[in-house]
Image: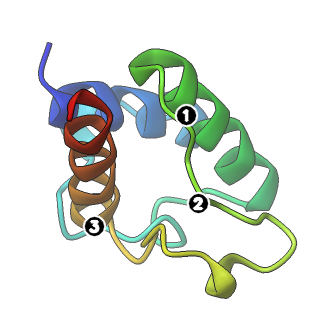
Amino acid sequence: MSVQDKIIEIIAEQALLEPSDISLDDTLESLGVDSLALVESIFAIEEAFDISVPFNANDPTASDFDITSVKSIIRAVEKLVADQKT
């Protein structure tokens, strides 16, 4: 499973949607992902990819981890996974 497919699966689970209902340009807000579901998504992403996501749930804007769209989350995770391999 690709990074993109796994991220979409995780977000879909938290948003109570089917993965096919999610597009790369969707925002978490537009998908109905609240702050608790966001934190649970971050934990699931960390576990799925064995990475540490630099995300501060108390101040999301202070993080380098871009959560503005599904696409930005995928790119951020791909970068973290690549950085971990080097």
Q: For residue 62, what is the image quadrant?
A: bottom right
Q: Position of residue 12 (x, y in %)?
A: 43, 35
Q: Secondary structure at mark 3?
A: helix
Check disc 3 and report the residue beneath it.
Answer: 72
Rounded to the nearest angstrom, the CA distance separating label 1 from label 2 is 9 Å
Q: Is residue 79 above or below residue 58?
A: above
* 41, 78: nearer the viewer: 78
Circles 1 and 3 in contact, beta carbons < 8 Å: no
Type of amino acid under label 1: Leu
Rounded to the nearest angstrom, the CA distance separating label 1 from label 3 is 20 Å
Q: Secondary structure at mark 1?
A: loop
Circles 1 and 2 in contact, beta carbons < 8 Å: yes
Mark 3 Cα shell of 10 Å, populated few (<14), some (14-19), many (≥20): some
Q: Is residue 44 left or right of residue 9?
A: right
Which numbered dot is residue 16?
A: 1
Q: Is residue 36 above or below residue 24?
A: above
Q: Residue at x 57, y 39 (%)?
A: 52
Type of amino acid under label 3: Ser
Q: Is residue 28 above or below residue 9?
A: below
Q: Is residue 20 left or right of residue 10?
A: left
Instruction: Give the mark nearer the N terminus: 3 vs 2.
Output: 2
Q: Residue at x 49, y 64 (%)?
A: 28
Mark 2 Cα shell of 10 Å, populated few (<14), some (14-19), many (≥20): few
Check disc 2 and report the residue beneath it.
Answer: 32
Q: Residue at x 87, y 72 (%)?
A: 58
Count the labels in the image: 3
Type of amino acid under label 2: Gly
Instruction: Give the mark nearer the N terminus: 1 vs 3.
Output: 1
Q: Residue at x 79, y 80 (%)?
A: 59
Rounded to the nearest angstrom, the CA distance separating label 3 from label 2 is 17 Å
Q: For residue 61, what is the image quadrant?
A: bottom right
Q: Position of residue 1 (x, y in %)?
A: 14, 12
